[in-house]
Amino acid sequence: MPAIINNIADALHLQSQTRAFDSKVTVIFVLGGPGAGKGTQCARLVEDFGFCHLSAGDLLRAEQHREGSEYGQLIQTCIKEGSIVPMEVTVKLLENAMKVALQEQRSGDGWTDGQGRFLIDGFPRKLDQAEKFEHDVGKATAVLFFSTTEEVMLERLLERGKTSGREDDNVESIKKRFNTYKEQSMPVIENYEKLGKVIEIDSSFSIEKVHQQTKSAVANLLS
Ligand code: C5P
Ligand code: MG
């Protein structure tokens, strides 16, 4: 949806009435190519700021293996092919996981009086996911964008593939994932760029160095 319409709708509270979560819930999307370091950095931010970290890919893999899931086969095929799972599935999984986290009534910064803070990792990977989430679930406060080169990402993924057991950490799947990233996920980042919501961090460096930069950016955001 064009930004201008979004803002007008916001002002009139037309859209917010239909969202599952209100402005007490802080949502930060975490994007970047496969192997950019999203999951690693999210784990650090959980320690720093008490976020609930939800990885869309992890939720999809859990659903794939859940007994009785009607989406198991579909998810497996999409993951292997590096293509995007139909957005309804992923958005629903995220919404459910957010509900569970809020019902836990956690304590600590960002979790009192119905508040909550979430890192939504590896999502939205496609424009339709972004639109559906922001319409049905909640508004994104910001997008953390971990950027690095394909060479760096390839090396990390192949290293991870030695132990991850993931069906998509192999050269063939990785190439497809890079393509999907360029064709479908970059437009999402560009879209949020136009809205002034993107914080870009060069994740080519060590985990520690990237963490320091990320931590100060997020501290700014939450202050
Ligand atoms: O983020 P991660 O690399 O774990 O995602 C693995 C796969 O899960 C993606 O390549 C894609 O097939 C699927 N996925 C998706 N939509 C998302 C996140 C992941 O379809 N938002
Ligand atoms: Mg990940």
Image (cartoon, rainbow, N blue to C red):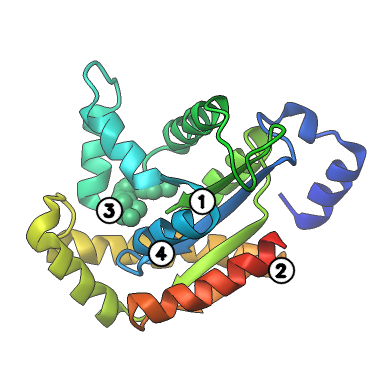
User: In the rendered structure, are the residues bearing label 4 and label 1 in contact, judged by CB atoms less than 8 Å apart?
Assistant: no
- CA separation, marks 1 and 2? 18 Å
Q: Is residue 186 left or right of residue 134?
A: left
> Ligand 1: does it lie within 8 Å of the C-beta at label 3?
yes
- CA separation, marks 1 and 3? 22 Å
Q: Is residue 73 left or right of residue 142?
A: left
Which residue sits furthest front?
Answer: 108
Q: Which residue is mark 4?
A: 41
Q: Earlier in the sequence, mark 4 or mark 3?
A: 4
Q: Which residue is mark 1?
A: 119
Q: Nearer the viewer, mark 1 or mark 3?
A: 1
Q: Earlier in the sequence, mark 4 or mark 2?
A: 4
Q: Is residue 184 visible?
A: no
Name the kind of residue labelled 3 in the image: Gly
Q: Nearer the viewer, mark 1 or mark 2?
A: 1
- Label 2 crowd bin: few (<14), some (14–19), many (20+), radius 10 Å: few
Q: In percent of the image, x 24 and y 24: which residue is there?
A: 66
Residue 116: image quadrant is top right
- The count of marks equals 4
x, y percent for residue 15: 78, 35
x, y percent for residue 146: 45, 71
- Label 1 crowd bin: few (<14), some (14–19), many (20+), radius 10 Å: many
- CA separation, marks 4 and 2? 22 Å
Please give the label number shown on residue 196: 2
Name the kind of residue labelled 1 in the image: Leu
Q: Earlier in the sequence, mark 1 or mark 3?
A: 3
Q: Which residue is mark 3?
A: 82
